[in-house]
Amino acid sequence: MATQRTFSIIKPDAVKKGVLGQIADRFEQNGLKIVAMKMIQMSQAQAEEFYAEHKERPFFGELVDFMTSGPCVVQVLEGENAILKNRELMGATNPNNADAGTIRHDFCLPVEDLSANAVHGSDGEEAAAREISFFFNSDELVTRV
């Protein structure tokens, strides 16, 4: 397996709950290194552009509203098979269907809004590259030794 980089967002609901450190710890305890991280307040324009692939879906407006509702933490994770590892750690998109021990199960239940599912993670290599470059310049990415 090759070392990969993937993109992750700790969403506004998790930041508001004060669990961002616990979530970051999950990544690190499971072999993912954080090579870039920053807290941002996403603008409406940023959220609309970032989630543009969902523009025609009925939940698009609610998703944009949620992602701009408070600060979030954007980060780049690196490790062996990082994309799959991150997706396993996150759990099912719907926290009600997430396995015990996953981030979404442990930090989102009970869930009222499916957008408020604590984390976002890239679903493949192309998405990871696009999402990383959306929020980070190359000089913001640390090279680990």
Image (cartoon, rainbow, N blue to C red):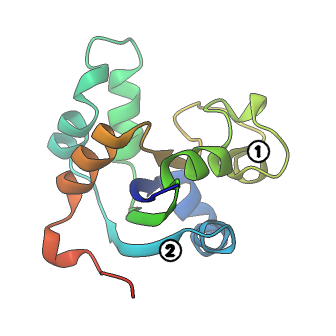
Provide residue 64's location: percent of width, then percent of height.
Answer: 32, 35
- Name the side, left or right, on which 52 lies relative to 113: left
Amino acid residing under circle 2: Lys
Say which of 80 and 128 sits in front: 80
Question: Which is closer to the viewer, label 2 or label 1?
Answer: 2
Give the structural element (helix, strand or loop) at label 1.
helix
Q: Which residue is mark 1?
A: 105
Packing grade of label 1 (10 A; few <14, some 14-19, many >=20) is many
Identify the mark at residue 141; answer none if there is no mark: none
Q: Position of residue 57 (x, y in %)?
A: 35, 12
Looking at the image, the residue that sits furthest to the front is: 1
Position of residue 131 measured from the top left corner of the image (x, y, whole percent): 27, 48
Quadrant of the rendering where the C terminus is positioned? bottom left
- Quadrant of the image occupied by residue 96: top right
Helix, strand or loop at mark 2: strand
Q: Amino acid at mark 1?
A: His
Residue under pointer 2: 33
Side of 117 where 109 appears, left or right: right
Left-right relation of 16 to 140: right
The single residue placed furthest to the bottom in the displayed view is 145
Q: Residues within 10 Å of mark 2 (few under 14, many from 20)?
A: some
